[in-house]
Image (cartoon, rainbow, N blue to C red):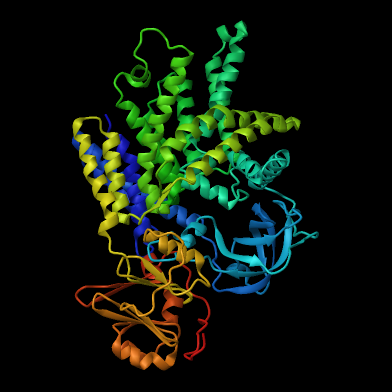
Amino acid sequence: MRWPLWLPACLGLGIGGYFLLPAEPPSWLGMAAMGNVALLAFAFRGRAGAVPLVAAGFACALGFAAAQARTQWVAAPVLPKRMAAEITGRIAEMEARDGIVRAVIERVNVAGLDPAATPTRIRLRLPDADGTLFPGQWIAVRAMLMPPSGPVAPGEFDFQRHQYFQSIGATGFALAPAARVIDTPTGAERRGFALWLEGVRERTHRRILVALAGTASAVGAIASALVTGKQGAIPGDVLKAMRDSGLAHLLAISGQNISLVAGFVFVLLRGAAALVPALALRRPIKKWAAIAAFLSALGYLLISGSSVPTQRAVAMIGFVVLAVLVDRAAMSMRLVAWASCAVLLIAPEALLGPSFQLSFAAVIALIAGYERLPGGTGAWVHRGTQPPGPSGRAWRYLVLIFMSSAIASAATAPYAIYHFNRFSLYGLGANLLAVPLTGIWIMPWGLAAMLLFPFGLESWALVPMGWGIEAMIGLAREVASWPSASLVLPSLSRGGILAVSVGGLWLCIWQRRWRLAGLAPILGGLLSVHMAAPPDVLASGDGKLVAVRAPDGTLALSTLRGGKYAAEKWLLESGQTWTIREVPEGTDWLACDAQACLYRAKGQVVALVRDGAALAEDCAAARVVVAEFKAPASCRATAAVVDSVDLWREGTHAIWLLRDGGVRIESVRGRQGERPWVPKPGGPPRLRPATNED
């Protein structure tokens, strides 16, 4: 019976429905929906055919209620406006790179700000050239604070929502080096488990860097990323090479790493106990080893930062251990279903992130793929009557690596394109070499280093681990240098990725021939890349950047002076790389002078006005006016206007010019809706005067 495997999807449907709402629903709505479904279950009791429908409805209501409860649980003040202030607080998390620390500060006090309006946590960039900052320290610093930034375009990744669920109410940067606070507040000496654990992670990170100080900087940084999950020290060129070669997933602690830790502990302890006949014959050594394996996986989860893939892996290992303890066989697809339910109920917001989607897509596809092999995995790879020898086992391992890489790459590619707009053309071949290198050499030495840390002997294992990392970096750079190694593609639409997800689940969950019907929505979702009409004009929320779409479909930017991140994301969404493009003079679709630019497309004119002297003429001639200052009401009577006040209130605007002469305008805040993580603009906008200044 496979229909219960759809319950996590229904749970996700309820969570997704909550986050898509344009306004925050009443706090009682989720619980009321669960109660109504419970009444339906009572009304249709005894009818077996109604059980799947009632269960699906209850899962949807439960997901909705869980998302509501989580939103209320993490609620914290958000900074209303940009401000410079003296700040004191305690470093809760930190990640250092090139003398700059990106730190999360808790127990914050902001001078001049009411305690009730002070964010619970803030994220700051702090100078730390001498490496003296450490988790748990109390610091005082003058910093520039600002509310969490919104999406760079309507429908893009929502940083405000992401930081809301981390209880981060402000971001900023230090205006001077931080000073250590000696006289800490009353009770400050008490540290929780999370703070102690962050200290352990930071000490481990620094010891790894010291042990591998004689190698290239990237080697120690990657070794630390594989043990502690801290990736901030990895050089940008190495990250780019790993991403372009399709090997970036190896830098993240995933289910493979967790499984290696648990498997190593299980085999080691069970093998050692089997050498003692009194234990092997009289005690349940398999159960003991299984419990120890789960505890080791849980420890690795904690020290590595508890990412979504590791949560999924530990949840699955926990269910496997439970099956061992009660002498039951574990069913893999059911394990994934229970693990996904656990993750979604604990952190419903994880559904929207790439980690959850990529991790579960890969695991579900791998399990479904191996379920379809005739006679099981081993029978398909080796059909002989005798057990394979060393060469046969090596061949089987390589074949399985190739199959696993191909299945996982195909399953995760749509989500990688949706979130990152990239596809690694040679990723399958690179993984065929890098995955065995990681599993056979790099991670075993990493596990040995973790065991040697308490004795101060970690360098014995970290040095050979570094040799493997150097080989992996060399492979990544070689593959990334090949022509068209990384393709930049336009993003799938939200409906397209949903269609791919539903089709993929249909294809993987069902086992009969009609499962192939799932290929239709997958194909339709992939084709949504070409179906969605991209905006013709984009204007950033701070008014510093405007982009217009050329007749060939590419974007042309107004400036390269500011807003580089937004510009890069806009270009990626259009399938373009970060390149400087000069619009030729005399072109018929874009004409500029010192006062304004006139953009022509689809029989309409858009005026991009920089000087108020040109406003009257442009308002009369243009269908849409985008002004860097406050436009008068008279202009709005003749044209659709987006001015500095609109940008300040609503964030980045996207403008579509319609063939019938109409105009569609969307803003970031209009797409976000009235939700708890969307702060109201604080204070008056900084208006640019309508003069000829630039």
Which x, y percent locates residue 25? Answer: 36, 61
Which x, y percent locates residue 433? Answer: 48, 32
Q: Is residue 31 visible?
A: no
Q: Residue at the far right: name it.
A: 182
Which x, y percent locates residue 685? Answer: 50, 81
Q: Nearer the viewer, residue 436 or 359?
A: 436
The structure residue drawn at horizontal position 46% and vertical position 63%, both measured from the top left corner, is 579
Q: Nearer the viewer, residue 515 or 77?
A: 515
Q: In this rendering, would 202 be left or right of 670? A: right
Which x, y percent locates residue 190? Answer: 72, 50
Can you say whether 612 is above or below 485 in the image?
below
Count of numbered tags: 0
Can you say whether 492 is above or below 396 in the image?
below
Q: In this rendering, would 694 be left or right of 122? A: left
The structure residue drawn at horizontal position 37% and vertical position 70%, both measured from the top left corner, is 670
Q: Is residue 581 visible?
A: yes
Q: In this rendering, would 461 be left or right of 417? A: right
Q: Nearer the viewer, residue 160 or 119?
A: 160
